[in-house]
Amino acid sequence: MNVFITRKLPDELLQPLRDAGISYTEWTEPNRLPQDELIRQCKQHDAMLSAGRIDMNTHFLNECSNLKLIALMSVGYDNIDIATATRLGIPVSNTPGVLSKATAETAFLLMIAAARKAFYLHQRIIQGEWHSFDPFTDLGIDLQGATLGIFGLGSIGYEMAKRCKAAYDMNIIYHNRSSNKKAEEELHATKVSFETLLQQSDVLSVHAALTTETRNKFDKAAFSQMKKNTIFINTARGALHSEQDLIKAIQTGTIWGAGLDVTNPEPMDKNNPLLFMPTVAVLPHIGSATVKTRYGMARLAVDNVIAGLRGEQLPQIINKEVYKQ
Ligand SMILES: NC(=O)C1=CN([C@@H]2O[C@H](COP(=O)(O)OP(=O)(O)OC[C@H]3O[C@@H](n4cnc5c(N)ncnc54)[C@H](O)[C@@H]3O)[C@@H](O)[C@H]2O)C=CC1
Ligand SMILES: O=C(O)C(=O)CO
């Protein structure tokens, strides 16, 4: 039994594979894995461990229907055609939970950075402009007691809400498909309509998966309903917001600013106007990038590979239906 791993992982994380008698090939090149090479590799392997965002479209899956499983090292699975994987009988797993705290901390960091223009001021210092800051006009905004609106109150949204409540006693409102009783009881969170979320949030933090329903959810119409002081945070997926509409909303003062860990496309162009706006903070999709979290994700992915190659049900299966066919 063997597995193709799309990126080099620390050797100690692969010991369980060796112990289980599973051999592996890692993609060690610094450049991104081209799809024809991915297909060539996957045709020669029984499983694939996807460490990094790779487009697993219908063509790829049809070509690689030999795979006994695909283990993603991410919680999001918008980059794989799950319906086709299911039709072909390929179980797909992800890594929920282990990355929730680290990703929420990234959202929290971006919120403060945008509120206090931190990334912009850092750039000014590098440019030798320590005194560029006007102490009466270049001020930030306070977060104490502000209203935090969460779009998609699942695992990461809950951790973000918990941090905002503890640090700033923020009032929590959320819009979700179902009620989150834990957040309502512990954080006094209130479920609201999408319109109320837009109209009442001082900070609006996006934590829902990218689906056909959520794509472009935050567009001109949405930004125009927000408050002038709203900070828009997105650590979910860049395609949930319209970048052009966000740029206009900030340039025209419709909203205050934004904190983005995800963009569309990734990487973001180095001349993107968002990178030069005082009230915007951008990070290169590092939500889960801490040692403990990344190791936890890799361990879960490896456990899924071992279970799948032993013919067992994957511990973190996305497409359970695959076992019912
Ligand atoms: N920036 C980063 O590095 C990371 C980004 N992510 C992104 O964060 C997303 C969320 O992750 P988790 O919190 O673990 O997922 P989750 O499944 O625990 O939470 C997502 C929540 O969004 C809700 N939701 C989905 N569609 C909705 C809609 N149309 N309207 C309202 N609510 C909706 C769901 O009901 C659920 O409660 C992932 O799908 C991924 O795209 C996840 C980890 C790291
Ligand atoms: O897990 C995810 O969905 C990510 O975006 C990367 O950790």
Image (cartoon, rainbow, N blue to C red):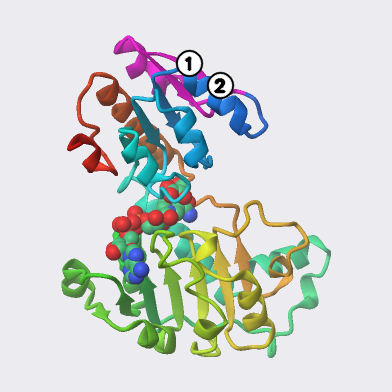
Whether residue 274 sits left or right of residue 263 in the image: it is right
Quick check: 93 above or below 26? below
Q: Is residue 114 magenta?
A: no
Report, in whole angstroms, how far the alpha carbon at label 1 lies from the one at label 2. Answer: 7 Å
Left or right of 134 in this view: 232:
left
Residue beneath the point at 29% across and 44% down: 318
Give the residue at the far top of this rendering: 21
How crowded is the residue under tag 1: few (<14 C-alpha within 10 Å), some, or many (20+)?
some
Residue for badge 2: 40
**Ligand 1: quadrant of the figure:** bottom left
Q: Answer with the quarter of the image where residue 21 lies.
A: top left
Identified by mark 2, the residue type is Arg
Disc 1 residue type (three-letter): Gln
Is there any visible trace of residue 259 in the rendered image? yes
Relative height, residue 178 to residue 39 (above, below): below
Front-most of 159 and 301? 301
Taking the spot 46% from the left edge, 60% from the top edge, the residue there is 236
Q: Which quarter of the figure is the C terminus placed in? A: top left
Q: In which quadrant is the N terminus drawn?
A: top left
Q: Residue at x 29, y 13 (%)?
A: 20
Label 1 sits on residue: 44
Question: What span is in magenta?
Answer: 1-28
Q: Tell me if residue 12 is in the magenta stretch.
A: yes
